[in-house]
Image: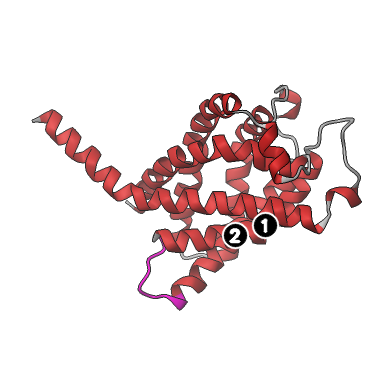
Amino acid sequence: QKVINAMGAGAVASVIQAALSAVGEPIVNRVLVKRMKVMDAVRDVSPAMMLDFFKTTLTTNFLKFPFFEAINAFCAALPINPSIRGVFTGFVFTTATLPVTNFRYRKSMQLEVNWANIYEAYFPTVIRDIVYGICRNYCTIWTLAAFPQWAATSPQVLFIVVILGCLGSAPFNEWRGYLLQSKGQELTFKEFFKPSNFVRSTSLGAIKQGLALAVGYWCAPPAAKFLQGLISAIKG
């Protein structure tokens, strides 16, 4: 039941995050990979591009979000160490969904998609997702210990732990961004890894991710109740 609920929450979060990502992801990716300033990235993305990208974010989110939340919920029900749980979640999720992730990234940057780049930057991405899973699991434990009246699926818990997970795994996300630079347009290592660039791209990405999942879990119960009522009404 927990896995099913998590998938439902993940599905709701998928729609919410798809809308947020259609606006934010092209900007975040330009900040992450091209190291553009936020306002320059905003000016580089048109409303038409955002609307077109929404089709991509919605489709890919329905694959990625529920899958990750289902894996996380399944592992949370097992009596295993949080580190092992994080490794398992990150490895399975990344290996299965990296083609989708890279397809989405390239669409957001209006780059060509082909078989040669669907597993691009695999190593830093799988490490990033493993570290994210571990950080999120430990942060959940610590947050619930500090606020025992909250549940693991409380929106406020998810907002906190997802952001902390993103921050903890940020160095590997930056490494991924470095490897995803377009050939012939690469920044040097020193130029790419400026602290100001790191702070800018990490904070944007973490807040977007945390907000989407927290709102998804907040909306999931009333959305599920509404759908159940609608189905009951149709059945008569």
Q: Which residue is mark 1?
A: 169
Asked whether residue 224 is drawn in magenta, I would say no
Q: What's the amino acid at mark 2?
A: Gly
Q: Is residue 78 visible?
A: no
Percent from the top left, x then y, of residue 19? 49, 37
Residue 64 marker: none
The extreme bottom residue here reads: 146
Residue projecting furthest to the left? 236
The x, y position of residue 197, in whole percent, is: 77, 52
Q: Hey, which quadrant is residue 50 in on the image?
A: top right
Which secondary structure lies at badge 1?
loop
Q: Amino acid at mark 1?
A: Ser
- Of residues 167 and 198, the one nearer the viewer is 198
| Magenta stretch bounds | 145-153
Q: Which residue is mark 2?
A: 165
Crowding at dot 2, Cα within 10 Å, few <14 / some 14-19 / many 20+, comes out as many
Q: Secondary structure at mark 2?
A: helix
